[in-house]
Image (tube, rainbow, N blue to C red):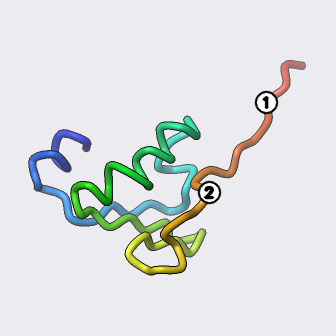
Amino acid sequence: MLADIEAGKVGTVITKDLSCLGRDYLKTSELIEMVFPDYDVRYIAINDGVDIFKSENKSISPCKTKLHMPN
């Protein structure tokens, strides 16, 4: 996907929710806050109501993290 974004082949990325974009909080934040805007790519997370082209979503916490504890 990143290669297609860099090549200008992608204008919008749509996922069901933020967790579907990535599991790594830092990498997901980088995509939403730096990569997508740099390449003028719109990101939409349907269930979370996120659309980075809307002004109210410019600064978001992209991941809903879950703590996984070993049994």
Question: What's the residue type where badge 2 is placed?
Answer: Ser
Q: Position of residue 40 (x, y in %)?
A: 23, 63
Q: Residues within 10 Å of mark 1 (few under 14, many from 20)?
A: few
Q: Is residue 63 left or right of residue 12?
A: right
Q: SS at mark 1? A: loop
From the viewer's perspective, is residue 25 above or below residue 46?
Answer: above
Q: SS at mark 2? A: loop
Question: What's the residue type where badge 1 is placed?
Answer: His
From the viewer's perspective, is residue 71 above or below residue 33?
Answer: above
Location of residue 32 by image quarter: bottom left
Q: Residues within 10 Å of mark 2 (few under 14, many from 20)?
A: few
Specify the farthest residue to the top: 71
Q: Position of residue 3 (x, y in %)?
A: 18, 39
Q: Is residue 43 left or right of residue 41?
A: right
Quadrant placement of the N terminus: top left
Q: Position of residue 55 (x, y in %)?
A: 46, 80
Residue at 47% across / 37% down in the picture?
27
Nearer to us in this view, 49 or 6: 6
Residue 68 is labelled as 1
Q: Is residue 14 left or right of residue 39?
A: right
Location of residue 54 by image quarter: bottom left
Q: Position of residue 49 (x, y in %)?
A: 56, 75
Look at mark 2 in the image and give the residue it sits on: 61
Residue at 32% across / 56% down in the picture?
36
Quick one: label 2 or label 1, which is nearer the N terminus? 2
Nearer to us in this view, 59 or 31: 59
Residue at 68% across / 51% down in the picture?
64
Residue 56 is labelled as none
Location of residue 15 by image quarter: bottom left
Residue at 43% across / 70% down in the picture?
52
Nearer to us in this view, 50 or 68: 50
Nearer to us in this view, 10 or 40: 40
